[in-house]
Every structure is written in C-alpha cells, then in structure tokens.
Amino acid sequence: MNEAPTATLTYDGKTVELPVIEGDHVEKALDVRKLRSQSGWITFDPGYANTAACKSAITHIDGEKGVVLYRGYDLEELAEKATFVETAMLIMFGELPTRAEREEFRIMLRDQELLHEDLLSHLDGFPPNGHPMSILSAMINAMGSYYPELYDIGSPEDFRLAAAKILSKVRTISAFSYRKSQGLPLNYPNPNLDYCRNFLHMMFSVPFWTYQAPDPVVRALSIYMLCHADQALDTSCATVRMVGSSQANLFASVSSGICA
C-alpha cells in the first residue's frame, strides 16, 4: 500500500510534514489543519486567494480550459439535454432526477410559488428604484419569520422542502421586484406553467393579456439560468458557508450570499 504523499516544511530548525491532498482534476493542496498544533505557526493568505475552503464534488470550473462540470456532468451536455430545474436538482441532491422525482419536485415548486400576503407589505416598503438584489436578499431573509419550522433542518425531507421553497419563491420575488420597479401590477404565479414559462408570465403579462413565451425564449432562459446555477466556491458560496457555520438559519445564510 502506497504511503500518502507529504510535503516537508522546514523553518528555524523545525520540520513539519504536511499531507498532500490530490483532487479529482489534478489539483494538489497542502493540508495545514494541524500546522498550528504541531509547530505553532499559522498560514497567511489574505482573501483566501490560495486556500481551498473545503473538499467539494459539486462543481469544477477550469476557466483556462473552458471546462465546467456539475457533479461530473459537462455543462455543454446539460445545456443541450437538461432543463434548469433538472440541473438544480442535480446540484442540490447529487443525481439527475428520475421522471418520478422530477414530477414530485415540480409539484413542490408549484405548491411553494406563492408568497405569504404579509410579505407583500414588506415589498411595498422598498422604493421603485431599489436594487433588485437588495430587495431579493431582504425578502429571503424575512421569509425565515414565516417558516420557523425550517430553522433547524434535520432530515433530507426538510432540506428538499426548504430547497423547493427558496427556489420557487426566488422566482416570484424577482418578478415582483421587476414589476414594482416599472410601476406595474403584480402577476401571481400560474400553477399550470413550468418554471421558466411561469417566470416570464409573472414578468411580462398584463391585465387581460397573458404573455405566451415563445419556445426559443423559454429555452434560452432555461439555458441561461442553467449556466449560472452554480459557480463553485465563489464569493457568494463562501459567504453562505461562513454565515451557515455560525448556525444561522438557511434563509439568513442564503440572504447573505445574495449580498456577496
């Protein structure tokens, strides 16, 4: 059995052996978790520019080679064959959904698409020219007050419900904030439409005329959101991890990532 590779760090007469961790895509990292206890030294890396915060099998991005992988699937292949919701399920739950799983989650998204009416009073308090990301962050954070049962997620079922709740209501909040900025009446979600068609309906329908999004527009929106579904350990992800590590609830953690 081959011994795990190590790197030797020597300074001021003291030597420390640091384990070398190899990623799935040729990356190599020095494991410094025991550096302080073994030597009294610490690392200095402002902005974590050269520090991996965790091991992850979710997203791999190599900008120099033009490679993006979600759970090992190439982004180009997903863009060609999958929808945004299917890709979101892949990222969140680890596998592409079966037809039955996709239908079950579609129903969950449908059931979670409405906002509590009291949240609309919160929305009314923002100026029409308020930044949409600020509005989205504040609304997501406020949602936690309406669903305290999800403050402590203790099962896969709880996580699935929370994911569906946020994923569905983010779309509604985004459309409502746009309508407010234009001085237009709000369009409530249509439970008969899929994720992207429903978003376009809430954005562009007007009283007595329902916007019928052309298929190429719906497909383009799905691909656009699919391509931005996850950005690996970027600033937003790091912020959510940092806030969540303090035992903040999911809504507050996601809200912080929106601000980052």
Image: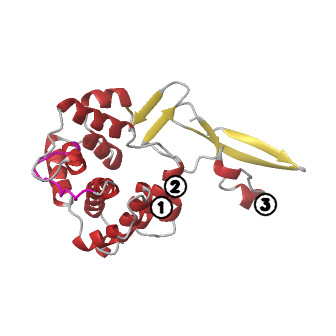
CB of mark 2 within 8 Å of CB of mark 1? yes
Count residues near mark 3 (Cα–Cα under 10 Å), then give few for <14, some for 14-19, many for 20+: few
Direction top: furthest residue: 65
Instruction: Tell me the residue that label 1 is attached to.
Output: 256
Q: Secondary structure at mark 2?
A: loop
Residue drawn at 73 percent across, 59 percent down: 36
Foreground disc of the pair 2, 3: 2
Q: Quadrant of residue 227?
A: top left
Does residue 172 sit above or below 18 in this rendering? below
The answer, for residue 96, to whether it is visible in the render is: no
CA distance for labels 2 and 1: 7 Å
The amino acid sitting under disc 1 is Ser
Residue range highlighted in magenta = 184-196
Q: Secondary structure at mark 1?
A: helix
Relative placement, left or right, of 189 versus 7 is left
The amino acid sitting under disc 2 is Ala
Q: Position of residue 218 (x, y in %)?
A: 22, 36
Q: Which mark is residue 260?
A: 2
The amino acid sitting under disc 3 is Gly
The chief SS type of the magenta part is: loop
Q: Which mark is residue 40?
A: 3
Residue 179 or residue 22, whichever sits in front: 179
Residue drawn at 45 percent across, 70 percent down: 248
The answer, for residue 113, to whether it is visible in the render is: yes
Does residue 257 sit above or below 147 in this rendering? above
Relative placement, left or right, of 84 versus 62 is left
Query: Split into 4 quadrants, where in the image is the N terminus?
Result: top right
